[in-house]
Image (cartoon, rainbow, N blue to C red):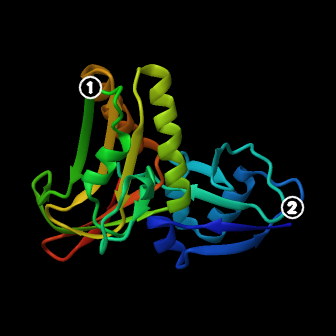
Amino acid sequence: MQVTIRFFAGHRDIVGRSEQIVTIAPDATVGMVWEQLVAAYPRLAGYTGRLLYAVNQEFSTLDSPLHDGDEVAFIPPVSGGSPEREVGVMDVQPYLVTNAPIDPAPLVLFVQTANDGAVVTFAGVVRNHFDDRSTAYLIYEAYADMAAKVFAQLADEARTRWRIGKVAVHHRIGRLEIGETAVLVVVAAPHRGPAFEAAAFIMDRIKEVAPIWKQEHWADGEREWRE
C-alpha cells in the first residue's frame, strides 16, 4: 500500500519537503509509519510523544489502521472573502484559514441574530516581543483544510457547554507584521457570560489542537518555530 505523508513546520524543515508518498505494509498503523519515518529521518525522534495524528484530515491515534491512498499527517506541537470588495454576510465562511488580512466586521454581522444580546470578539495580535526577546515579524503555517474543520468542531463543543449562538473563527497564515491580527474568534449569545467563556475556551483549544504553527523571526535575524 501507499500513503501520502504531509509535513509541516519543523517536520518539513527536517525532511526537506512538504509531502512524501511512502510504501507501507498492508497491516500498517499510524504508529508504524511514524517509526518508519524516524528511521529514515532520525531528527524526527525528538517529536515522539509530543504529536497529534491525523488520517484524511481527522484526528486519529497511533493504533489507527491505514488503507491504500490515505493522507497521514503527524502534527508537530502547535503554537500555541476577497479584500478588494465588500463582503456580505452570505459570503462569509465562518471557519477559515486565509492569507488575507482579517476584517472583524463581516464576522460580527454573520454571527449576530435578533436573539443575541452579546457578541464577543477576541483578536490575537502580533506583538513585538516574546519574553525578553524582540520580534521582527511572524510566519504562520497551517494544515489549512484540517484546521478549518477543527475550528468547527471546537465551536460545536462550546455549544454543548454554554448557551451560545453562531461562532466564527478566522486565522491568518503567511508573514504577519507587528500589530496585525493573527486570529479572530467571534461568539454570539443571548447573554455576555457564556459568550466570554466560550470565546476563551475556543481560543485556548485552538492553541492546543489546531494544526497551525508559528515561526518567530527575531530582531537579531534568527528564527525558530514556537511551540
For label 2, the SS is: loop
The residue nearer to you, when weighing 129 against 106, is: 106
Q: Is residue 191 visible?
A: yes
Q: Is residue 31 above or below residue 158?
A: below
Residue at 22%, 73% (x, y): give it: 222
Residue 25: image tag: 2
**x, y (%) of residue 16?**
52, 79
**SS class, disc 1:** loop
Q: Residue at x 36, y 66 (%)?
A: 173
Q: How many marks?
A: 2
Please report whichever mark, 1 or 2, sits nearer to the chain's N-terminal start. Answer: 2
Outermost residue on the right side: it is: 26
Amino acid type shown at disc 2: Ala
Q: Position of residue 172 (x, y in %)?
A: 34, 62
Which residue is denoted by mark 1 in the rendering?
117
Q: Quadrant of the N terminus?
A: bottom right
Relative height, residue 111 to residue 35 (above, below): above
Q: In terms of depth relative to the viewer, which is nearer, 32 or 110?
A: 110
- Horizontal side, residue 214 vs residue 151: left or right: left
Looking at the rendered structure, the kind of residue marked 1 is Gly
Q: Position of residue 152 (x, y in %)?
A: 51, 43
